[in-house]
Image: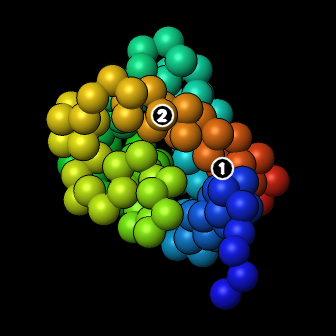
């Protein structure tokens, strides 16, 4: 496989997640997902990645089919992905919340910036394909 830029990897992952939602969720869940994706960047900027991620989990109330949970899981998969080149802030971590609270500030800030960059793609694709 040819090497992709980080920007291409973000786009590819985001599109895969949107296709999953498109193919596996009902219209109500798809619409909620779009709404949540649109508001998450502002939530991250206002409250930080940890608070925003914890809020997604709390609002999902343990329901893995809830749009909040689907967004949390997509974010976790991106930030915690296995990445031999070390570009994933929490590469290989199983638990996003544990990674957030156990890593130092520099890693946290990198993860927050990475989440916002990835969300630009997720938001564009969500609006284009689900909106």
In this figure, which residue is indicated by the disc labeled 2? 110
Name which residue lies at 27% across and 29% down: 104
Which circle, 2 or 1, is nearer the viewer?
Answer: 2
Q: Nearer the viewer, residue 34 or 15?
A: 15
Write down the residue under mark 1: 122
Question: Residue 17 appears at what percent x and percent y?
Answer: 57, 64
Q: Give me the residue at 39% from left, 27% from top.
A: 106
Q: Nearer the viewer, residue 30 or 84?
A: 84
Q: How many neighbours does mark 2 have within 10 angstroms: few (below 14), some (14-19), or many (20 or more)?
A: some
Q: Residue furthest top?
A: 46
Residue 14 x %, y % = 63, 58
Residue drawn at point x = 56 percent, y = 47 percent: 33
Residue 130 position by quadrant? bottom right
Vertical order, 48 against 99 (above or below): above
Query: 49 or 113: nearer the eye?
Result: 113
Say which quarter of the image contains residue 3.
bottom right
Callout 2–callout 1 Cβ contact below 8 Å: no
User: Whole-percent x and y of residue 7?
Assistant: 72, 54
Residue nearest the observer in this picture, 64 or 88: 88
Q: Residue shown at 24%/43% (left/top)? A: 99
Query: Can residue 56 be spotted in the picture?
Result: yes
Which residue sits furthest front? 85
Q: Residues within 10 Å of mark 1 (few under 14, many from 20)?
A: many
| Residue 117, image x, y percentages | 64, 39
Q: Outermost residue, bottom direction? A: 1
SS of the residue under disc 2: helix
């Amino acid at each position: 496989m040819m090497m992709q830029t980080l920007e291409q990897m973000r786009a590819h992952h985001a599109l895969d997640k949107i296709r999953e939602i498109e193919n596996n969720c009902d219209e109500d869940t798809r619409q909620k997902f779009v709404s949540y994706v649109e508001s998450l960047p502002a939530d991250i900027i206002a409250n930080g990645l940890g608070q925003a991620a914890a809020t997604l989990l709390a609002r999902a109330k343990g329901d893995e089919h809830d749009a909040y949970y689907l967004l949390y899981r997509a974010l976790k998969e991106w930030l915690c992905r296995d990445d031999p080149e070390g570009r994933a802030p929490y590469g290989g971590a199983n638990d996003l919340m544990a990674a957030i609270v156990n890593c130092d500030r520099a890693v946290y800030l990198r993860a927050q910036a990475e989440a916002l960059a990835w969300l630009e793609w997720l938001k564009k694709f969500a609006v284009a394909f689900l909106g």
